[in-house]
Amino acid sequence: MDVRRLSRNCAFVFPNTLRYRQYKQAAVSFAKLSQQPPEAIAVYVHWPFCRQLCSYCNFNKYVRSVDKDFEQSMVECILQDAAGQLKASGASDIFSIYFGGGTPSLCSASSIHSIIAGLGRLGNILPDAEVTLEANPSSSTDNKLRSFRDAGVNRISLGVQALNNEDLQLLNRDHTVEESLRTIESCQQIYPSQTSLDLIFARPAQTLQQWQSELEQVLQLCETHVSLYELTIEQSTPLARQVEKGELTVPGSDVKADMYQCAIETLSSHGLYRYQVSNFAKPGCEAQHNSSYWYGRPYIGLGPGAHGRYKRHPTPATSLSDRCSEAAAGGSVRSAGDDGDDGTLVDDKAWHHCVQVPEPNAWMTQVKATGSGAAKCTPVQHIDMLQQVLISSLYTDAGLSDERITVVSGQHSCCRFSAASSYVSC
């Protein structure tokens, strides 16, 4: 493998090697997030239902028919859990909402509106808040896309994945290329400059020439935001079994590297700069919600299997059984005065990582009984959180900065970070 080529691919993680224009744009993107009120939070909503399972996917998703009553119960539980999590986080402002899955575009626009409106009653959705919905071409008619917009969605992330029907069938996607083309055109009209396309590369038997042709076709359809993901062979998936049996072969590491380099050159030549390893955008079209993960901003996770990361602010009068996920069956939450895994004292206002019960029926049963869908909510040691920010910074073009550390720690001090960690030296 060409080490020099790979080093060029990775050079953007160090700010002093960035081209000035790209680094300046990265600073602008981060500034927008860092200028959000300190009590502002992002909200992720997981809608885990799909029409069919993709052959490569190991996400928390379920193939089942969702009737109107079940959907209404899901919405009510999402908002009930949101009330508790927003209170626990101390957040008053919401700067981003993201509907992921699963396939959220299978959900009715009225339910999406109910969730957004409900969150607006529980907190203050900022006027410039980004509200993104993941969509599949097969469940995104022109009328439905307009209904989502009227419900409050202002950005669409469209799961195209491939632009040839043979590969779509191989991946067990439930749409065709023709449906993708139609949906992209509709999204461009309804969500101008706020449409993102997801593509998978290094698919079985895919060649570099095919990939370059596909990228050029994509750029003719959408020139605002593209997310590229190398196909990962996840254990216990149908695709993994096919590869293990020798029925399918995936490109080698050198070809994958060539495909990624090809994507960088092709997309940048059309004005889409690489602001994160998998994400390319025209300046001003970056995904604010996903950037909040990389920049260490707080977020809550709602719905079956969702994850959240935020500082908990329980009131002194709150009983142990009522806080976050203490009442969750099998869940665990440590409070002030409890010892951490390393024997250190855990602060009640420390960052916490919360994970929701994965199975939808079990999740709803627990929310209705306790007000919380959390399976586990555990404190994150301060240094561990800082190290997470360091690692995620290496995936972005802005790199690590004092501002990012300040977002997490509340202290503008790189030296404190380096003193507690062997990862960084001032």
Image (cartoon, grey):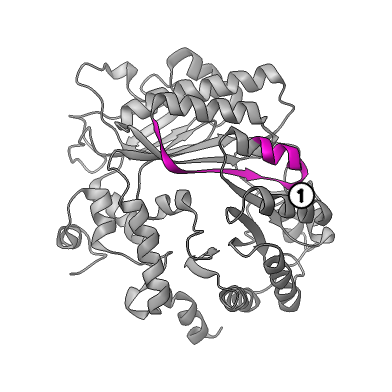
Q: Is residue 374 left or right of residue 216?
A: left
Let me know if residue 22 is in the magenta part. Answer: no
Number of numbered discs present? 1
The stretch of residues the image draws in magenta is: 124-147
Direction top: furthest residue: 369
Q: Which residue is mark 1?
A: 173
Local SS, label 1? loop
**Residue 148: x %, y % from top left:** 64, 37
- Residue 214: x and y, percent? 73, 69
Relative image position of residue 258 (x, y in whole percent)? 62, 79
Judge whether residue 250 can be spotted in this image: no
| Residue found at x 64% / y 40% | 102
In the rendered image, which quarter contains the C terminus?
bottom left
Image quarter where the N terminus lies is: bottom right
- The residue carrying pointer 1 sits among few (fewer than 14), some (14 to 19) or many (20 or more) residues within 10 Å by Cα, namely many
User: Going by the image, does 142 lie left or right of 350?
Assistant: right
Residue 129 highlighted magenta (yes or no): yes
Residue 139 in percent (x, y) is at: 75, 40
- 323 on left or right of 305: left
Image height of 8 relative to 289, above or below = below
Residue type at mark 1? Arg
Quadrant of res 415: bottom left
The residue lying toward the viewer, choosing from 356 and 93, is: 93
Answer whether residue 350 is visible to the viewer in this image: yes
Task: Give the answer, above or below, for where 182 lies relative to 14.
Answer: above
